[in-house]
Every structure is written in C-alpha cells, then in structure tokens.
Image (cartoon, helix red, strand yellow):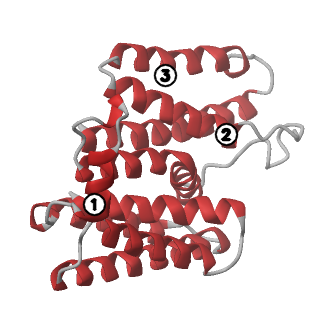
Amino acid sequence: MSWLAILLIGFAVTDLTHSVRRTPVLPGCVGGVVALSVGLLAGLGSGRDVVALLLISGVVVLWDLTVTWGFGHPGPAWLPLTLFVLALGLAVACSGLAPVSAGPLGRWLDSVSLPALSGVTPDRFLLVLGAFGIQLSTGNVLVRLVLKSTGTINPAADGAMPRTRLKGGRLLGPLERVFILALALGGQVTAASIVVAAKGLLRFPELSSRRDQQRIHQMTEYFLLGSFVSWLVALGSYVLLA
C-alpha cells in the first residue's frame, strides 16, 4: 500500500499548496517532490520503487495541470476527475506489488514513544496521513470539479441570491470530512451518520422556504450534490483504511 499512500500524499500536498499560493505548475512540482522524498524516506530505493515514485510524481504534476485546465475551461471538467479515478484505481490494483515501507521513517516510528503510534507500521502511517490529507483541500477540489462538470451552479454566485462575504464553506467541508473519517476509524459510524444528518437539519429551514422556488430548487441540487461528493471522499478514504 506504500505507493497508494504516497500518491494520496502527493495529491494532498499539491492541492494544499495551490490553496495557499496560486502559481502555475508550482503546486504540482511541490507535490511531486514531496511524494518522491516521502518514498525515499520510507526506504523505497530499489529500481522498481524509483520508477514507481517517478511515475507518481508525474501523475501529481499532471493532476495539477489538469485541475487548472478544468477550472479555466468553460466546459465540463471530466479530464482531471478521470485522471484522479484512474490513478487511484491503478494504485490500488498495484498495491500488492509495492514493498513494505521501512527506512528512516520506520526507524523513527520505532523510536517514538507516543501511544497512538505504538505498533503502527510505516505503510499504515503513510496511508492514514494521505487519507486525512486528502480531506483538507483535495476534497474541495473534487467537489468543485463535479459541480462544474454537471453544470450545477452556485445560486449565490449566479445572482439568484445576495452575495455573502462568508467563506466558511471552504473550511467547514474539510472539517466535516476529517470529523466523519475520524469517527468512522474510531468505530463510531453511528456518530458519523449523526453528523451527516445534522448538516441536513441545519439547512432544512433554508431549503424548505416557500418563497422563490426556482432558487430553492437550485440550492437544493447544489447542496445535495456537493454534500454527497464530500461525504463520498470521506467514506472512500475510510474504505481504504478499513
């Protein structure tokens, strides 16, 4: 699973870098370098591993380029979504070929006295790190790509409702996904489902208003599709870790 974990880390670092500094190509290069460095720290230094790490770095750079193109292109953004799914599927399919991580990372984990890291293998550590990293910024990117590809508009951005200065959604989404994933990993799946239900209840008064039904229908579609994609990112990560 080491290759899969490094791919997730590369995606996560790329999107986090892009959210901090919107510079062309730079986020992908940073993500690719981090993926390669993490692989070497995990002791993946054989010829086959180096080839795999270079391929992963290339995919990470390509992910950055296709995402930039997808948001700048007026049509659907299926290209970056297809790349993400294919890369993830290929990494899962080839996970049995990946060697067990060790190297400096393994020695560091053996030396750490934190109870939470006791007995954790390097592969497991990297996979958890990548899965939680994906929730932070990559989840938002995937949600936006799906909304754009399906033509689902944001009623607030389309002039159908007053604009707002609130930007909490960009933070609430990652917090929600991290919370759901953490609860699920802790065996509290029921508690995670309560979080999902609570979000719907909080939006119910706004979505059930009898005024301006066209705007309500648009907002409901936007809310449901975005929420389901966001939850799918969290639950999909849980499946990888389970």
- Residue 76, horizontal then vertical, whole percent: 55, 66
Marks 1/2: CA–CA distance: 26 Å
Tell which circle, 1 or 2, labels the residue nearer the N-terminal end.
Answer: 1
Residue at 30% from the left image edge and 67% from the top image edge: 86
Q: Residues within 10 Å of mark 3 (few under 14, many from 20)?
A: some
Q: Amino acid at mark 2?
A: Leu
- Residue 193, horizontal then vertical, whole percent: 41, 18
Q: Quadrant of the C terminus?
A: top left
Q: Residues within 10 Å of mark 1 (few under 14, many from 20)?
A: many
Label 2 near label 3: C-beta < 8 Å?
no
- Residue 201, horizontal then vertical, whole percent: 60, 14
Q: Nearer the viewer, residue 56 or 110?
A: 110
Residue 75 in which image quadrant: bottom right
Q: Amino acid at mark 1?
A: Leu
Q: Residue furthest left?
A: 96
Q: Quadrant of the N terminus?
A: bottom left
Marks 1/3: CA–CA distance: 28 Å
The answer to whether residue 85 is visible is no
Q: Nearer the viewer, residue 115 or 127?
A: 115
Residue at 39% from the left image edge and 64% from the top image edge: 84
